[in-house]
Image: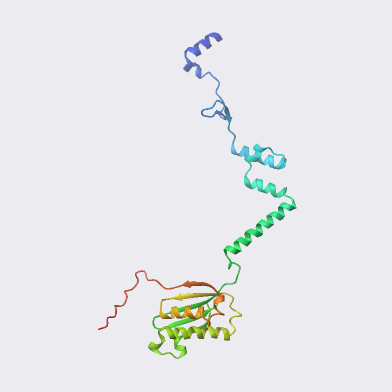
């Protein structure tokens, strides 16, 4: 068939001659809004190419385009291999600074667990219990141990005397050498709570308050629960 006739037919009927035209390969495409073709490569081939570049070419001789395609972890590993002793010392100094900042942020992270002093301030009595970090009791005293009976156990004065007595017992038994950190745990809001605070901040607690590392409140809160007793009405 005459080539001039085919060319004229293709110009006249483009749909007929379109199937005869050579098609571009699947991997050679044109980007939108651009006439520049872009060759798509598979992910495996690209990974293998990067591995070959890392194994064959040092980090200093690689061009900027190749370094841009390498991940940050690979760059860090390459930097560790080619880093001199001065760079290592600089890294150790940075590590020391980070550890110091962590110690400032959490000053008690590397210390032994604290002992616990439970202060149960009931409206009818005050109970003080000293325990080890694992929960084993070391001392447990209440206002009844000081000679107060029945209704006389409640109030500010019995709790004040009890707290002073407990602090004196801790010093006499030599527990200050064993206790390095002390956590005070309050419970309930009886009159003994304020008495304990006054003694701790007073002259009787000068050797104890330096050991206190934490003060918490373990007062129990009731959400629903059983029915409360009726309100007492006098007169």
Q: Position of residue 126 (x, y in %)?
A: 44, 82
Q: What's the residue at 40%, 88% (across, down)?
A: 152
Question: With respect to residue 104, does 195 lie above or below?
Answer: below
Q: Position of residue 99 (x, y in %)?
A: 63, 61
The image shows a total of numbered marks equal to 0
Q: What's the residue at 57%, 27% (across, down)?
A: 37
In the image, 89: left or right of 152? Answer: right
Question: With respect to residue 62, does 131 lie above or below?
Answer: below
Q: Position of residue 83 (x, y in %)?
A: 72, 49
In the image, 170: left or right of 227? Answer: right
Question: With respect to residue 79, does 38 lie above or below?
Answer: above
Residue placed most toward the observer, 78 or 23: 78
Q: Position of residue 125 (x, y in %)?
A: 41, 83
In the image, 217: left or right of 228? Answer: right
Question: With respect to residue 198, does 149 lie above or below?
Answer: below
Q: What's the residue at 49%, 83% (across, down)?
A: 163
Q: What's the residue at 71%, 52% (across, down)?
A: 87
């Amino acid at each position: 068939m005459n080539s001039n006739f085919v060319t004229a037919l293709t110009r006249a009927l483009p749909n007929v001659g379109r199937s005869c035209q050579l098609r571009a390969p699947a991997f050679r495409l044109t980007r939108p809004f651009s006439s520049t073709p872009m060759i798509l490569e598979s992910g495996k081939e690209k990974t293998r190419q990067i591995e070959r570049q890392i194994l064959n070419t040092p980090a200093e001789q690689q061009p900027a385009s190749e370094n841009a395609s390498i991940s940050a972890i690979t760059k860090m590993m390459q930097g560790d291999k080619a880093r001199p002793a001065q760079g290592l010392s600089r890294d150790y100094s940075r590590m020391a600074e980070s550890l110091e900042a962590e110690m400032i942020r959490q000053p008690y992270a590397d210390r032994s667990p604290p002992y616990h002093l439970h202060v149960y301030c009931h409206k009818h009595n005050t109970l003080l219990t000293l325990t080890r970090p694992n929960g084993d009791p070391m001392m447990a005293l209440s206002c009844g141990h000081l000679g107060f009976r029945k209704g006389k156990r409640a109030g500010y004065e019995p709790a004040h005397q009890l707290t002073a007595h407990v602090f004196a017992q801790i010093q006499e038994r030599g527990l200050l050498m064993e206790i390095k950190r002390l956590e005070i745990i309050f419970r309930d809001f009886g009159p003994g709570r304020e008495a304990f605070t006054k003694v701790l901040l007073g002259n009787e607690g000068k050797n104890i308050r330096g050991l206190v590392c934490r003060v918490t409140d373990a007062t129990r809160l009731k959400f629903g629960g059983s029915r409360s007793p009726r309100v007492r009405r006098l007169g």
